[in-house]
Image: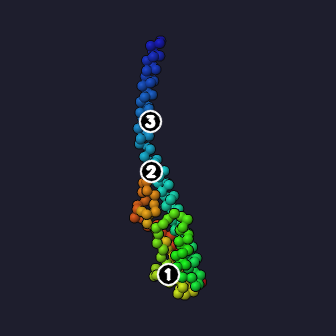
Amino acid sequence: MKISKIMSRKWQNRSWMQRRGAVIVEVALTLPILLYLAFGTVEFGYYFYVKHALEAAAREGARAGIVSGNTNTDVTTAVTNAMASTGIATYSTTITDTANANVTVNTVAAGSYIKVTVNANWGTVGMRPLQLIGSSKTVTGQMVMRHE
């Protein structure tokens, strides 16, 4: 009877070792997928943060632009002030009408629309570890308001 117990334990140990190897293979196959999901979630979250920051800056620029007597410098200053706390240093600001023609804010007729657009290239503001979002992507925030 002792021999059968010893033999059964031997087979149990061998079975345990085989299961351990299977677990390592399963982890090796699933870990990269889980890491891509985790880093992708973080990168897309950061993308939405950048998009929201650009939209907020465009809104502040448009609010400065609709006041009569303000100039394009007032608009770009408002955008710069809004972007100062975001940590995004490279962006561009354009001030146009709804037909995308460049305008000077202080010469726009009352009742006309002013569109402020703030653009940033994802390659310069994006996260570096995986670059799941292409570096050539342009992130845009824009706001249209009616001039007073």
Marks 1 and 3, how far apart in space?
A: 61 Å
Q: Which residue does the numbered mark 2 point to in the structure image?
A: 36
**Image quadrant occupied by the C terminus:** bottom right
Q: Is residue 119 above or below residue 47?
A: below
In depth, the one of 134 and 73 nearer the eye is: 73
Regarding mark 3 in the picture, which secondary structure is present there? helix
Which label was assigned to residue 97? 1
Mark 1, other Cα within 10 Å: few <14 / some 14–19 / many ≥20: some
Residue at figure coordinates x 47%, y 54% from the top left: 40
Q: Nearer the viewer, mark 3 or mark 2?
A: 2
The amino acid pointed to by label 1 is Asp
In depth, the one of 81 and 63 nearer the eye is: 81
Residue at figure coordinates x 41%, y 42% from the top left: 29
Mark 3 or mark 2, earlier in chain: 3
Mark 1 or mark 3, earlier in chain: 3
Applied colour scheme? rainbow
Regarding mark 2 in the picture, which secondary structure is present there? helix
Q: Nearer the viewer, mark 1 or mark 3?
A: 1
The amino acid pointed to by label 3 is Val
Q: Are marks 3 and 2 in contact (CB under 8 Å)?
A: no
Q: Which residue does the numbered mark 3 point to in the structure image?
A: 23
Residue 28 in view in this figure: yes
Mark 3, other Cα within 10 Å: few <14 / some 14–19 / many ≥20: few
Residue 59 in view in this figure: no
Marks 3 and 2, how far apart in space?
A: 20 Å
Q: Are marks 1 and 2 in contact (CB under 8 Å)?
A: no
Q: Position of residue 10 (x, y in %)?
A: 43, 21
Marks 1 and 2, how far apart in space?
A: 42 Å
Mark 1 or mark 2, earlier in chain: 2
Regarding mark 1 in the picture, which secondary structure is present there? loop
Q: Position of residue 143 (x, y in %)?
A: 53, 74
